[in-house]
Amino acid sequence: MNRYWFYLILENMLVNVIIFIPYALIEQRFDGMMQSILWGIPIGVFFIYLFMKSLSKFPGKDLPQIMREASPRWFALPFILLHGVMIYLAGAITMVAFCNITITFINPDIPLPLLLLVFSIVASVIIQLPSEKILYFIEIVIVIYVPWHIFILFKAFISPQMRWDAIVESLTHITNPPNWSGVAASSYIFSGYANMAIFNRLFKTTFRFRWAIIYGLMGILTLFGSVFIPIGLEGTGGVGDFTFPAVVAADSLRVQYGFVERLIFLFLFLYAHISFMSMVIHWHVSMEIFKRSLPKNVKQGKKNVAARWVASALFIGGVLILGSFNEEQFFRFSERWISVRLATEAMLVLTIVWAARRKKHAG
C-alpha cells in the first residue's frame, strides 16, 4: 500500500474528530445516530474500494485527464468544476470552523476576519507548491501528530470522569431509523480518498481489497471515538449543550505531572496543524483541478501564473464570506454541504468506475 494513500485518508479522519462529525451526529443521538453510523461505515468503505480500485486503472493520471479521455467536453468540464468547488468548500469550512474554535477557547479578542485572512494568505502561498511537496508536508504532520492523538484517546478512555452508562444509553436508540444528513456525516470520515483525483498522477500502484478493510477499521475507531468520548465525558444530555463537544471533552482531561496539565492546550495545538494541513490539501487539489480545466493558451507562461493567483484571491474571498455567517448559519450551511457532498461523491465514484470499465472494454 502506498503510504501517501494512507496519509490522505487518515488526515481526513483526524480533522473530522473535531470539526464536523461530533456536532452533526451527536445532535441526532436520540434519533438515528446509531443507524446512521452503521450505514455510513459500509458506504464509506465501499466508495473507497470502488474509487481507488477504478482509479488504479489510470496510473499517472488525474481526474481532468481521465474525464477528457473518457467523456465529451460538455459533460467533463462541468463535472470537473463541480468537484473542484466541493473540495474547495471542504477546506474553507474546516478553516472557518477551526478559527471559530481558536477564538472561543484561546483568544476571544482576535477578530475572525483577521484570523481567516492570515491563515488564508499563508495557505494560498503553500498551495502553489508541487504536489510532491504537499505530500511530504502531510507526512511530517501525520508522523508528529498521530502518537499524541493516540495518547489523548488513551487518557480519555481511562479518565475517571468517563461515564460508560451514558454511552450504553446512547446505544439503546439503535432501532431509530437513519436520515440522510447522519449517513452523509458518518461516511464523510472516509472521504480523504477524493483528493486522489489530483494526487493519483504521482502513483502507479494497484489498489487491493484488504487495504479497504484497513481503512474501514481505522474509520470505525475514529468515528466511535469522536462520538462516544464526548458522550461519555459530558453525559447523554449535557453533550448537546456544546457547539464543539470534542474540544470540551478534551478540556476535562488532565495530566497531573505532565509538562502541560490541561490537555486542551495540547489538543488545540495539534488540531491547529491538522486543520491547516487539511485546508492546504483541499485547496491544492481544487486549485489543480481548476488549473487543468483552463484552455491550453492559459496553461502556460504568465497567463497561468496570473490565473493561479486570481484563483487564490477568489479562495480567500470565499473564506471571508463564509466567515461572515453567524454560528447557526455556518453550521446549517456545513450540514447542507455534507449532505450534498454524499450525492456528488457518489456521482464521482460511479463516473470513475464507468471510465475504468470503458477503458477495459476499449482495450
Image: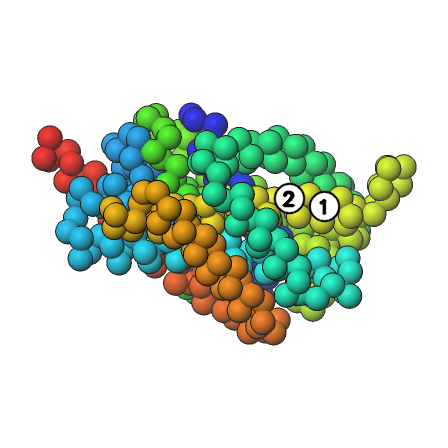
Q: Nearer the viewer, residue 9 or 280?
A: 280
Q: Which mark is residue 273?
A: 2
**Whole-percent x, y for residue 190 in the image:** 46, 45
For residue 224, above or below residue 89: above
How many marks do you count on the picture? Answer: 2
Left or right relative to 82: residue 101 = right
- Is residue 170 rendered to the left or right of residue 301? right
Q: Secondary structure at mark 1?
A: helix
Amino acid type at image mark 1: Phe
Q: Quadrant of the N terminus?
A: top left
Vertical order, 101 against 155 (above or below): below
Q: Mark 2: which secondary structure?
A: helix
Q: Which mark is residue 92?
A: none
**Are the two marked residues, 2 and 1, in contact with CB atoms closer than 8 angstroms?**
yes
Q: Is residue 348 left or right of residue 362?
A: right
Q: Nearer the viewer, residue 121 or 75?
A: 121
Residue located 61% across and 53% down the image: 119
Q: Amino acid at mark 2?
A: His
Q: Residue 303 in the image: x percent, y percent?
A: 35, 49
Rendered residue at 50%/33% (across/down) = 133
CA gap between label 2 and label 1 equals: 7 Å
Query: In this rendering, is residue 35 above or below 221?
Result: below
Q: Which residue is mark 1?
A: 269
Taking the spot 14% from the left edge, 40% from the top edge, the residue there is 358
The crowding category of the residue bearing disc 2, from other C-alpha atoms within 10 Å (few below 14, some 14 to 19, many at least 20), is: some
Q: Residue furthest right?
A: 257
Q: Residue furthest left?
A: 362
Residue 283, image x, y percentages: 47, 50
Badge 1 crowding class, 10 Å Cα cut-off, few under 14, some 14 to 19, many 20 or more, is few
Q: Residue at x 47, y 43 (%)?
A: 128
